[in-house]
Image (cartoon, helix red, strand yellow):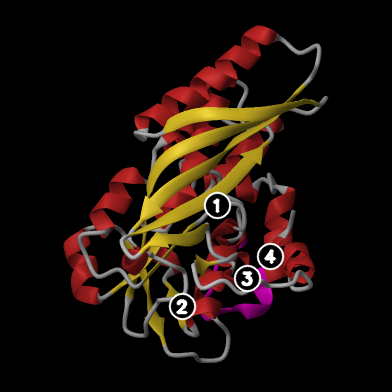
Amino acid sequence: MGPKVLDRVLARIPRVTNANVLVGFDMNDDAGVYKLTPECALVQTVDFFTPIVDDPYTFGAIAAANSLSDVYAMGGTPLSALSILSYPAKGDLDDLEEILRGGADKIHEAGCVILGGHSVADDEIKFGYAVTGTVHPDRVKANSGATAGDALVFTKALGTGVIATALKRGIAAAAHVQAAIESMLTLNRRDCEAMLKFDVHGCTDVTGFGLMGHALELAKASGVTLEIEAGALAFLPGALEYARAGAIPGGLKNNREFAACEVEVVRDLASEVENLLYDPQTSGGLLISLPEKDASALGLPRIGRVTPPQGKRIRIV
């Protein structure tokens, strides 16, 4: 569902105060965090979606990587997962086995274990996981801590949504699809472990709401403006070409409707580049806010900076 719809509906849901809830749904963060002890908190998240690639094994693995990502975005360590599956009652059982195998292999790559799950018969395939992890209560990397003067780094290239749409239309080159698949299969585990060595102030993973949608949530939660350098962004091979050709996913339009009112573009920007700012990502990268000196030492691609509030929440420079 689009972020604008979710925002409107969730605003009407009562909040229950609990001193152990460190991050709840009212904060629009990547996962919930519940303190168990002064030294340990649970990180909980859930994610599932319909197939975005043809190969069932690869689909299962991408779904797992995407589900794990929210735990990494909070600075947590995944521990266990429960599978969520919708599959046709008369569907191919070999394909189902491959979906589950792909997911299991990726979950195990993360050092996580599958405890079980739930399935329903449905004509439309959907698959993903509810993942539980742990984090120290004082080391949660929420989306509310970005500080004026910070640098912004982003760990992956954009364009998975546009490339998936091009694949569905039969116009995507095999090499471009493969590059997108490799990106989506890459766990955010290594980058999470790397960032935890530094004084990270805020973090979010860029997934279904696109770079602008997730950046907006980070900016609003932190009370700052994000300046993003369009020329510093990386795009997956073929992404600009397919955006130029009109391979625009429906989610991109929803993301633009949600975030564009808070985005100021202060430079000339090609329409395909602007579209990709809103492109819904699957298993996308981490957007990290941290001091300039730490950003240099971290060695990940720098895409902008955090400033005090200055009009709109995001400026594309």
Question: Regarding mark 1 in the picture, which secondary structure is present there?
Answer: loop
Say which label, 2 or 3, has the lower sequence index: 3
Q: Amino acid at mark 2?
A: Leu
Boundaries of the magenta span: 259-271
Alpha-carbon span between mark 2 and mark 1: 18 Å
Q: Is residue 263 magenta?
A: yes
Numbered disc 4: secondary structure: helix
Question: What is the x, y in percent for residue 33?
Answer: 48, 60
Q: Which residue is mark 1?
A: 207
Position of residue 295 measured from the top left corner of the image (x, y, whole percent): 24, 67
Look at 51% across and 18% down and name the residue there: 101
| Residue at which label 3 appears | 26
For the residue marked with disc 3, what is the amino acid? Asp
Q: From mark 4 to mark 2, how far is it between C-alphas?
A: 17 Å
Q: Secondary structure at mark 3?
A: helix
| Side of 251 relative to 182 (left or right) | right
Q: CA distance from mark 2 to mark 3?
A: 21 Å
In the figure, 253 relative to 67: above or below?
below
Amino acid type at circle 1 is: Thr
